Amino acid sequence: MLVTALRERNAYFVVAGWNHLTANLLLATLMLFGRRFAVWTDTPDVGKRRPWPWRILRAGWLRWVFAKADRIMGTGRAALNALRVMGADQRKLVNLPYFVDVARYRMRQSAALEGRPLRFISSGRLNNEKKGHDLALRALVKASDSTRVPFEYTIAGVGPDEQALRELAKRLGVEEQLKLPGWLEPEELIDLMQNSDVLLHPSPTHEPYGVAILEGMACGLPVLASDVCGAAVDRIESGVNGCVHHAGNVDELAEQIAGLLSAPERVRDMGGMARTTAQEWPIERGVSIIRDICLGQTQINGNR
């Protein structure tokens, strides 16, 4: 790629991020030799604490990148807001979030909700510090106790906190209601989502986007997610296609869950709206945005 940057004066480059040495070497080459490029990033963590020398060097480097880039792409509204805070020119910003193949993630099956526990699902690494599955389990128990309505909770994935989750479920008296199927292939995950009712994504710490949210919405699941997930801020309209809670707030999440346990008919309505939201962002839309950037036809503010 570096050789191409040196040889191809008329090539246009789209560089993903600046967190790796190879990407930074490519960016430096492009800027020094006056090549045209766009840069893309997921949602930066503007609140992250860094040593002051590194913070100053990083800020200076990014000012140079932002000044030289034709376009600066971010994954949704949260990313664009963060990039503005970091000094990116509003006129260069383009919304390019993550995409999933909506047609592949089929609409959930319309199984009857009455007469059975409501089925909740999460997908991600079993790491409570980053994914908050323990928070979700506590919220589910709290909501179930208050409504006297049972639930099932499946977490698809593997990770270091599998045993901790099993022990927590046992202490809370819901070990039979927690399902940990382990690693699933993509089609297996889709099938599991199709046979679930609600996706939980309660990350307690900064999550740049959260593709699981997009997958759940594409399957027609309402999503309950925390406000530190880029996709939650970008796609969820609380009370319409899901709900957003403050990160780490078990009581708030439990209240949202209780609302669905008490009125399961809302699950169908919100799930339908979630699917509609997903259909607004097919892969073709992402291809069109990148093509327009490469052809120099993107609208000046980029917020398509």
Image (cartoon, helix red, strand yellow):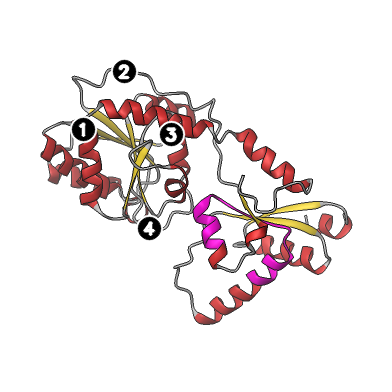
Q: Nearer the viewer, mark 4 or mark 1?
A: 1
Q: Which residue is mark 4?
A: 205
Check disc 1: other Cα within 10 Å, few if <14, some if 14-19, many if 20+. many
Mark 1 to mark 2: distance in Å? Answer: 16 Å
Q: Tell me whether the residue at label 1 lies in contact with that at label 3, contact meaning CB atoms closer than 8 angstroms.
A: no
Q: Tell me whether the residue at label 4 lies in contact with that at label 3, contact meaning CB atoms closer than 8 angstroms.
A: no
Vertical placement of residue 48 versus 23, above or below: below
| Residue at the image point whose x is 42% and y is 34% from the top | 216
Q: Which residue is mark 1?
A: 261
Q: Nearer the viewer, mark 4 or mark 3?
A: 3
| Residue 5 among those drawn in magenta | no
Mark 4 to mark 3: distance in Å? Answer: 21 Å
Specify the label residue 217 is tagged with: 3
Mark 2 to mark 3: distance in Å? Answer: 17 Å
User: Which amino acid, mark 4?
Assistant: Thr
The part of the image, by quadrant, that contains residue 166 is top left
Q: Main SS type for the magenta part?
A: helix
Does any portion of residue 287 appear in the rendered image? yes
The x and y percentages for residue 163 are 26, 46
* Pointer 4 or 1: first along the chain: 4
The x and y percentages for residue 229 are 42, 51
Mark 4 to mark 1: distance in Å? Answer: 26 Å
Q: Which residue is mark 2?
A: 111
- Mark 2 lies on a secondary structure that is loop
- Mark 1 lies on a secondary structure that is helix
